[in-house]
Image: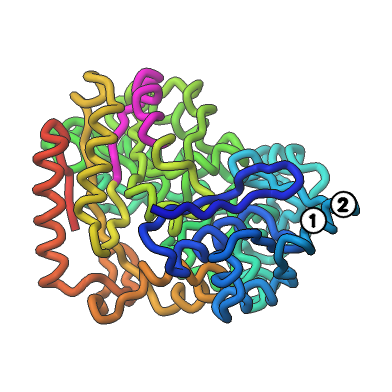
Amino acid sequence: MYLVAVLDWYSRYVISWELDQSLEQGFVLAAVDRTLQTAVPTIMNSDQMSAPMHIRQPSATIVFAKRQIQVSLYRTMRRVRERGGRRRAMATADTLVRIDTIYHEPTAFDYARGRQVRERHPQAALVEVPSHWQIPDLHGNEDLAESWNRVKRTVLVLGVKKGLQCRPFERSCDFVAPSSANGCAMACAYCYVARRKGYANPITTFVNIDQIAGAIERHAARQGFKWEATQADPTLWTYELGTNSDCAVDATISDNVRDLVALFRRLPNAKATFATKYVNDDLLSYAPEGKTRIRFSLMPAAIARVVDVRTSRVPDRIAAINRFMEAGYEVNINFGPVLYYDGWLADYATLCEQIDASLSPAAKRQLHAEVIFLTHSAELHEINLRWHPAAEALLWQLELQEHKVSQASGEQVLRYQHTLKRQLVADLLAVLRERLPYCGVRYAF
C-alpha cells in the first residue's frame, strides 16, 4: 500500500492524501487535484523518487502551467524556505464561503432577508443585475470554468423567487417545494444543478422567503390530512426543500432554512426533507420536533475524496446521524450517486459496516435509505475536464452508459445501460439487506 500526501511547506498542514496499491500516476494526481481545490501554491515540490516522475508527466504539468505553479525538486524548495517564503493553506471546512462579490437583482434589498445577507458580508462588492439567471460575467463566462471552486467560495447571488408552485414528485417526497436557494458552495463533480448553470454555479439565495413559506403553507392546507400512505411517508405530506441546493450549506448564508424548519414544525399535516453532504451543527438548534427529515448522502470514502469536492468527510456524515436524531430530526441515508467501478460492491459492504458500527439503536430503528445511481451529461463532462479531470475517470464511462430523458428535469442525461443497471441495483440491495437488515429502502433506481 502506498501513501501520497500533500503538505503546506511552512505549516506542515496536510492538505490532502490518497492511498493506492500501486505507484500508478492516478492516485498522485487525485491528491494534487484535491489540494488545488483548497489552495493554489506558488511552487509544487517533491523530495521522493516516484512523485517527481508523476508530477512531471504532461497530464500534470498542463494543470500546473494553467495555474502558473512552478514544479521543483527539494533543493529549490529548501532555498525558498531559507528566504522566508511561505504560503499557508487553509482548511476548506473553515472557509466554505468567503464572499467578496454579491450579484443582486434590483429589488433584493427591499426584502429583510436581502438586507440581512448584505449585513453579514459588509466587505463584499455589490453588482446589480437584471435577473439571477442573466449574469453574463458568471454563467456565460467560459474562462470561469477553471475557477469553478473559487467562484463558489467567493460569489453570492441574491434573487427573488418567481415560481412559487409546489409540484408533485413521487420519490423522496410527495411534493417539491419552491426553492429557497439555487446552486452550492460545495463542488460535487456530478451535480445536476451545475448542468444548467453554464460556467459557474455559486449559491443563489432567494430573499422573498416569506412568500416562499406562504406558498408552501397554503399548498399544505389544501391537501388536508394524509389518509393513505405514500412512499415518502405514511402519515405526513412530505416536501422536498433542497432539490436545487444543499440546505445545510444554505444555512451558513441566511436564515431561510431555519425559517422553513420552523414552518413545518407547526404545520399539522406536513414535514420537510432535504439531502446534504455537509455537516452543519448549527442546525441542531433549530428544534424540528420530528417534522424535518435530513438525508445524509453517503458513498465509499475513497471515491468521495475524488468526486465530493469541498464536502464534509464521509465518516463525519455518518457520525452526525446520532446527534441530529437526538436533536429532533428524522435522519435517513441517501446512497447517491452510486458509481460503478472495480471493487465497488466490496466498498459498499464496508460502508454499511461503518454505518452499522456507528449508529445508536434508536437511529437504527428509524433508518431508511434511498439508492440513486449516477447520471451524468456531456455538458458537465466538458466543464469538469477544465477544473477536475480526475473525477471524469469515474463519471465518464461511455462503454457502460446510455442516454435517457431525466424524469425530474426532462433533460438528456447519461445513465448506466439498462441491463447493467438492473443488475447493479439488485446487487447493492442484496448487500443492504445483509449488512443493514433494519434499514428500509424507499426506492432504488
Mark 2: which amino acid?
A: Glu
- Marks 2 and 1 sit apart, C-alpha to C-alpha, by 6 Å
Can residue 151 be seen here? The reply is no
Q: Residue furthest right?
A: 83
The foreground one among 374 and 50 is 50
The foreground one among 274 and 91 is 91
Q: Position of residue 318 (x, y in %)?
A: 36, 34
The residue that appears at 34% across and 45% down in the rendered structure is: 298
Residue with the mark numbered 1: 78
The residue that appears at 32% across and 77% down in the rendered structure is: 412
Mark 1: which amino acid?
A: Arg
Q: Are marks 2 and 1 in contact (CB under 8 Å)?
A: yes
**Residues in magenta?**
317-334
The foreground one among 229 and 83 is 83
Q: Position of residue 222 (x, y in %)?
A: 29, 39
Q: Secondary structure at mark 2?
A: helix
Residue with the mark numbered 2: 82
